[in-house]
Amino acid sequence: MPVIAPVPAARPARIPNQRDGAEDGVAAGTTVDHLTETYRAHYRSLLGLAALLLDDTASCEDVVQEAFIRVHSARKRVRDPEKTLAYLRQTVVNLSRSALRRRILGLKLLSKPMPDMASAEEGAYDQLERDSLIKAMKGLQRRQREVLVLRYFADMTEAQVAETLGISLGSVKAYGSRGIAALRLAMEAPV
């Protein structure tokens, strides 16, 4: 038995809306084709406008692209297609202002260096001293190194070091004093 498919109903003819020139109550506005042509014709001039307000090319390009995206998503609100360029220009200006506000806020929120912070030269010198200390520590006997690390870097008392290493309190004192003496010699020796 043949299958009978329903016949689609005929669509009513479109009647132009007399009020705004749109058809079937669809709001008039900038078409995608018109916006594309505006993009092709005015992209560089809008980029130049953004460049007057911002300082780097990447931000200018981002602002102009974002302006086109925003006007594209709101193109139905642009009633007169001749005003599309004006909307784009105003959007570029507003987005540039927003970008500058974000930058200024970011600069205000950056932590300012404290006056007692070391300079770069002092930091480099401190790094050299640390490197030579590590090298000198590696030259110590194992037990001396363990005692000094636990005592001064882990900030343990002599009794805690003795308990941790399982040695007497006198041994901790002896290894510590010999280790410090060896470090002094190694640090004072010419490199």
Image (tube, rainbow, N blue to C red):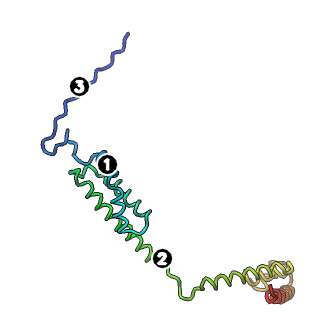
Question: In the rendered structure, which amino acid carries the disc numbered 3?
Answer: Ala
Corner quadrant of residue 189: bottom right
36 vs 162, left or right, is left
Question: In the rendered structure, which amino acid carries the disc numbered 2?
Answer: Leu
Placement of the C terminus among the 4 image quadrants: bottom right
Q: Which mark is residue 37?
A: 1
Question: In the rendered structure, which amino acid carries the disc numbered 1?
Answer: Glu
Q: Earlier in the sequence, mark 1 or mark 2?
A: 1
**181 or 165, which lies in front?**
181
**57 or 114, which lies in front?**
57
* CA distance for labels 1 and 2: 42 Å
What residue sits right under mark 2 in the picture?
110
Corner quadrant of residue 18: top left
Instruction: Give the vertical position of 66 relative to 137 (above or below).
Output: above
Residue 67 image offset from top left, x and y in percent: 34, 57
Q: Tally the marks.
A: 3
Residue located at (24% from left, 52% from top): 78
Q: Which mark is residue 10?
A: 3
41 vs 177, left or right, is left
Mark 1 crowd level (few <14, some 14–19, many ≥20, 10 Å Cα): few
Residue located at (38% from left, 61% from top): 63
